[in-house]
Image (cartoon, grey):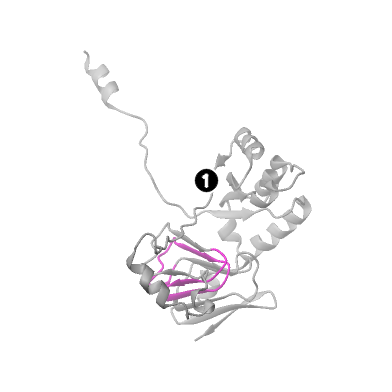
Amino acid sequence: MSTQATLSKNTTTIALKGGMFTLTTIQLLEYDLEALSAELDEKINQAPNFFLYAPIILDLQRISRQEEMIELAAVVDVLKTKKLIPIGIRGANKTYKELAIEAGLAIFPEEKIIVSKKRTATEDPKLTEKISASTSVSRQESTHTATRLITQPVRSGQQIYAQGGDLIVLASVSHGAELLADGHIHVYGPLRGRALAGVMGDKDAMIFCRSLEAELVSIAGQYRLSEDLKETCWKQPACIQLQEERLHIKPV
């Protein structure tokens, strides 16, 4: 075997590597191209550098439930005109998935919601006695809360979402990490990544942190970037809330 043949056999042109990246998801609630274009302009004007050529995932969960089909290609074109890069979809039915593949878009898996399984009396006989003795416990004490508690540092590339409630992080949040919550966000350590509260539109949601060093903060879709945040309360305990469609930051 020649030396050239040996080299050709032992070399490769690619290497497959895993990685975690923070991606922005746009959930399409209604099919109105003019309204979509206008709302995108509004968001981009708030943080132009953040959205410039940003990779975007389209969430079609709400649209997929509607009987009337939308023109997926038209939505993709609107995103591209705003210098956004649509890379895939999620929450779609079979028809939209086929259209996405034809358009060269990836199919992202559905978000996994991990629910802790509680042991029952049948799984642990020792619990039977305790349950019988606690019949006087009020219903309010046993009510499930949607608050999500994170006790470990949130590292770069991680995304944590508190669906239907608040998110509490007892440790630090690194650059490149992303926190999302339908309700409030509390960070009892340095907040260096991105924090988006009220992601489903709750304008009363707030963000609290022990040290404000964030790349981006958002409440109900209103954004402010680190360049703006450095003007007030930088590396200090802060409270962020939405007032008259603008984010207000004050020390705590």
Magenta-tinted stretch: 163-192
Q: Kindly tell me whether residue 34 is visible in this rendering.
A: yes
Q: Nearer the viewer, residue 191 or 197?
A: 197
The location of residue 227, given as percent across then percent down, is 52, 70
Q: Name the residue located 43 percent from the left edge and 61 percent from the top edge.
A: 116
User: Residue 38 vs residue 127: left or right?
Assistant: right
For the point 61% across and 60% down, the residue is 48
Up/down of 87 relative to 173, above or below? above
Q: Could you say which quadrant of the image residue 206 lies in?
A: bottom right
- Residue 92 location (% of width, % of height): 62, 44
Q: Pick whichever, 149 or 30, lies toward us.
A: 149
Mark 1 element type: loop
Local packing at callout 1 (Cα closer than 10 Å; few below 14, some 14-19, many 20+) is: few
Looking at the picture, does residue 150 appear above or below residue 16? below
Identity of the residue drawn at 49% across and 78% down: 141
Residue 184 drawn in magenta: yes
Q: Quadrant of the N terminus?
A: top left
Question: Residue drawn 76% across and 50% down?
Answer: 33
Coordinates of residue 96 in the picture (x, y in percent) = 65, 39
Residue for badge 1: 109
Tell me if residue 189 can be seen. Answer: no
Q: Residue 139: image x %, image y %? A: 53, 77
Name the one closer to the observer, 46 or 67: 67
